[in-house]
Image (spheres, coloured by chain):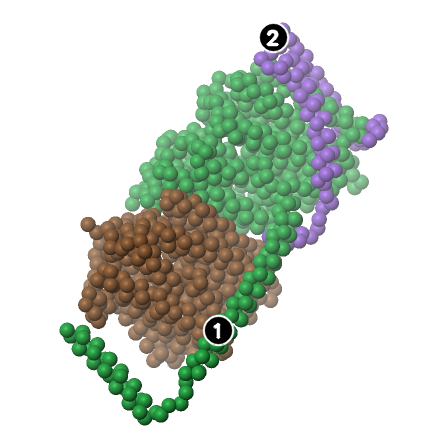
Amino acid sequence: MPSIPLNPGFVLVLAGFIVLAAPRFARAPIMAGAGLLGLILLLEHDFGAAAAVAQMGLPVVLLNLDVLNRLFGVALLIALMGLAIFAHARRNRVEDAATMIMAGGAVSALFVGDLVSFVAAAALSGLGAAWVVFCSQREGAERAGVRLLVWNGLEGLLLLVGVAFHLSAGADSSVFSRMDVGTVGGAFLLAAFLMRTGAPLAHVWVKDTVSHASPLGGAALSAFATIVGVYALARFFPSEPLLGPIGAAMVVLGIAYAAAADDLRAACAYGQISQVGVCVTLIGLGSPLALAAAEGHAFTSVIAFTALQLACGAVLERRGDVRISGFHGLARAMPITCWLLFIGGITVAAMPGFSLYVTLSAGLEAAAQWELQWLWTLIAASPAGLFIALTLRPAIAAHRRSDDAGVINEAPFSMLLGAGMATFFGLSVGLAPNWLYGLMPADIAFAPFAWDRLAPQFELLGAAGVTYILLLVFGALPKERPMQLLDVDSLYRGPLADAGRWAGIVILRIYGAWQAALAIVAERTGAGLSAWMRRWDWPYPSRGWSALQFLTVAGLLLIMLVGAQL
Amino acid sequence: MSLEFALAFMLIGPAATALLVLALSRPPGLRDVVHIGGALAVAAAALFVASAAGQGETARIVLARPLPNVDLAFSIEPLGALMGALISVLGFAHAAHAAGIVRATQEKAPARLMAFLSLALAAAMAVAFSANLFSLFVSYQALILATFPLVAHRGDEDARRAARTYLATLLAGSIGLLLPALVWTYAIAGALDFQPGGMLAGRVDTFTANALLVLFVFGIGMAATPPLHRWLAASSNAPNPAVVSIHAVTVLPAGGIGLLKVFALVFGGALAEARIASFALLVLVGVGMCVAALIALSKQDLRERLSYSCMAQSLAVAMGGLLALPVGLFAAALQVVALSCAAATLTMAVGTVAAATGRTSVADYAGLGRVMPWTFAGFALASASMIGLPPFSGAWAKLWLITAASAAGLTWAAGLAALAAVLTFAHLGPLAAHALAGRAPTDAFKRPDGASILLAAPVIFSAAATLWLLLLADPLASFLAPIWTPAS
Amino acid sequence: MKPSFQPPQRGGIAGLALLFCAVAGGAGLAFDFLLNGGVAPRMLVSAPGGRALIGLGVALVLVLAAHVLRRLLGRALYRVEKRDA
């Protein structure tokens, strides 16, 4: 039996099953250990594809390591270790197992070398994500899980159809080359990957699931759910012109909703959509620097937003709710968590010295090389938006005095440790980016800490902050009150669902009437037939007739037998 | 043990088991052991035969020779061996499950039920291993007659009416359509033996091919092609072991096997001549899949819902076969395997739940997964496979089906298959999800000890069988290849 | 709405934040003009002070967007969800 190349994702899935049976004190070490083991496997393995095994007439390549997926893999495994430490504080073994399965599916999808395995791994990750949402104890989580299943099912179907058409056009499924969106298969695959990434109209599942998940679940979902889509776009559709406007729409949509949302976890999810949108536009740009910047940016934003969600999760654990309208008194009650929130916020705002700055400025440079003003402006503007939405707004709200005495009720230590680890990883990458640049695909000779790059970023953030605070002082900001924002999902949860139900009732009525009509027709026909048959059933003298019948049958048999002999 | 002996054992064994069960019906433990043991022996023989067929060995036994060139013969070839292994393995799981159900629900005349289950298994094995159209026809009739008492088991008015519908539909199809098709084929080809590459290849003109195709497809009513599908819904109210047998182990798979043999070994290359009929049938089957899934959505009783769901999946088999490409036949074969495993799991799970809790309607299933985790884990896996969610086996069958449809240039057929998958998700997905994730009901169980191992283990076993395609699918492609390559 | 002059929120860090942002912005602007003052910019927006304008614009637009979104799409929290799947 040929040796199975060990895809790091398989280690995670296996660990997930072990976690189901492990005692409480062992679960977090198993999860973190699995992440570490995966990282070691990853870094030790040389580049190249493992041997193709044939399955159903298709080549299956279980491991194909190159620069692109190594980068994403490192990000996910580091995020996983932070999540594992965080998970130690919670007593939910099923949720831990579901998280590992989701993580394992995502990481496997990154490293497999053929389309069919990719689809299988991505689908496994999606099922794991739905399971994570189901494990949450929050109200409405079960329905949110079912909605996620619907999205996953739709996406899986699109993937399946796309792969089928791609194969039927004669392509080799184990060769990963750029796909053409003009072909039917390519179009379906692009739609599926965009759905996974959170493109506009399909972005609602990110917000929906994160806001309904548990503290750990929200962070896990934001780490693993959309990254597979970004990887797939980078692998299969680099420099695809459609991605530019789509990414731009994601950026705008994400920042607008992030600034308006009351639920901080939903706001962070929208913020993540916007930064993923930056990655998508850079992938659409397609130059080597742009692709490298996009991939690096995905790396840093995964870890940064996971850290932010972990901090939000800590607040959720203690307070039951992460609404900005309910943040008063938080700074007194949970000071460390507030610091973590703040640092997470300025990380995603691309403050120099933190991780997103180094990759965002690389992206800016890539856009500047092509002299695309709108793209450059958009990418430059997004950190300012996130600064306002995810740093200043929560921080100011958290420092408002509340009426109670301010007992310190800090989050559990494991949670703080996990969130802190992820947050400070962002700081370390931000201060010493060459490590990250070394991992990235292209050879980037890029100096992010040159003064002529630092100064504009400070002035951007400073100007945005000053303006915002002045607006606050003048009372021009919207008042913080408990509310929720409608998004595309209100359409299918409200009017569309009602329309569907009405249509279903109408069809049932029609079907019922059809069945009734058929039954009447069948009955009449049956009655008519039996009446007709009875007319032929008149009494006849028995003796003569039966002898005649016997002789006829005997004669026929005789003819058949004699004829068969001839 | 020689292959001929194994083949004979697979056909006669279940019949002998039936007689033994009837004879040794008291004490109940003995009856159950005989039934399960017989099924196990048949499964072992089938696996032995399948591995031999994989090496390329064949065997043939002849039971009678009524007409020149026509004998009642059974032979071992890859497709039959695969299907025989599938049916017998699922039959073994089903035997254990039936024993459990019969005890839990105090079903009346359990020995008679089990005897007819075994007879149905024997007939289905005969269908799988039939060497020519005549044996296929005879085994098909035997299967109808063996399963008719299963539908009528309870003996009350509803059961009798359902049994009448069942018998009428299937017999009308087989005697009214399949028999003439048989005779016509004999008239054209002079023999009825199955040949790789099709015995009619090159011998039929367009009109004959079209007419024969229509006769065969509608004649094999066990494949549930509308309008001969009423038997499926009519049989859904029979005792659960009967339902499992009919929907998942014997009748519906036999329909699929019959269609596969007809498409691959009777028509073969001649399918290209029957373009009009195959196009029309593709439309019928494609639309039928979607409508069946939609009707399933409207049913609140789970047994009826599952019967329409199985119908939709069975129509996918027909679609794969009608595409006239080797890859379409491969897709159809995969679909039969995936459908049988998934349907067996689902129907057995429904039976387990009904026996342990008495609940059969969709609204009552919410949260049950928390008190019956193993059963519902199997239910969820099988639902995912029926829907076609990767990475479960149903997904790969659908993948090949859509590939075949697009390779044949019939994109709309692929679209219909995809739409049917979406509709299947609609009627199975939220059901499984709510069952697993809802609030657990507090007074679920009728019996204090819940469901016995005999009721839960077969569900898990066949759910695991839905995953096996992932691992063993590749050998299948080369295993089945001899069927559609014409013998030179 | 009529802008009314309110003192900064009591107990808040708005004042501290304002100070920091002003210092950072001012320092950034100064360095920007110093370093890039004489050089012809590649693009219009990368002229010195351009990013400050972007920041200002983003803040204004975002606050406006928040108002609009909340007005149009904001709803009170619903407690019990109807069946939607």
Residue B198 vs residue A141, the one in the foreground: B198
Q: Which quarter shows the N terminus of chain B?
A: bottom left
- Residues at discs 2 and 1 in contact (Cβ within 8 Å): no
Amino acid under label 2? Val
Q: Quadrant of residue B254?
A: bottom left
Q: Are marks 2 and 1 on the same chain?
A: no
In the figure, what tint was chain C given? purple
Give the residue at mark 1.
A525
Q: Is residue A538 shown above or below B4?
A: below
Circle 1: element type: helix
Say which residue appears at 44% left-offset and 63% top-offset: B227
**How far apart in space, not on screen, are marks 2 and 1 (Cα)?**
96 Å
Give the residue at mark 2.
C39
Say which residue appears at 70% left-offset and 22% top-offset: C56
In the figure, what tint was chain A given? green
Of all residues shown, which one is farthest toward the top? C38
Q: Quadrant of residue B181?
A: bottom left
Residue B391 vs residue B422, the one in the foreground: B422
Q: Is residue B5 shown above or below B267?
A: below
- Residue A95: % across, % down: 55, 48
Q: Is residue B154 visible?
A: no
Q: Does residue A160 appear to the left or right of A263 in the view shown?
A: left
Say which residue appears at 37% left-offset and 54% top-offset: B277
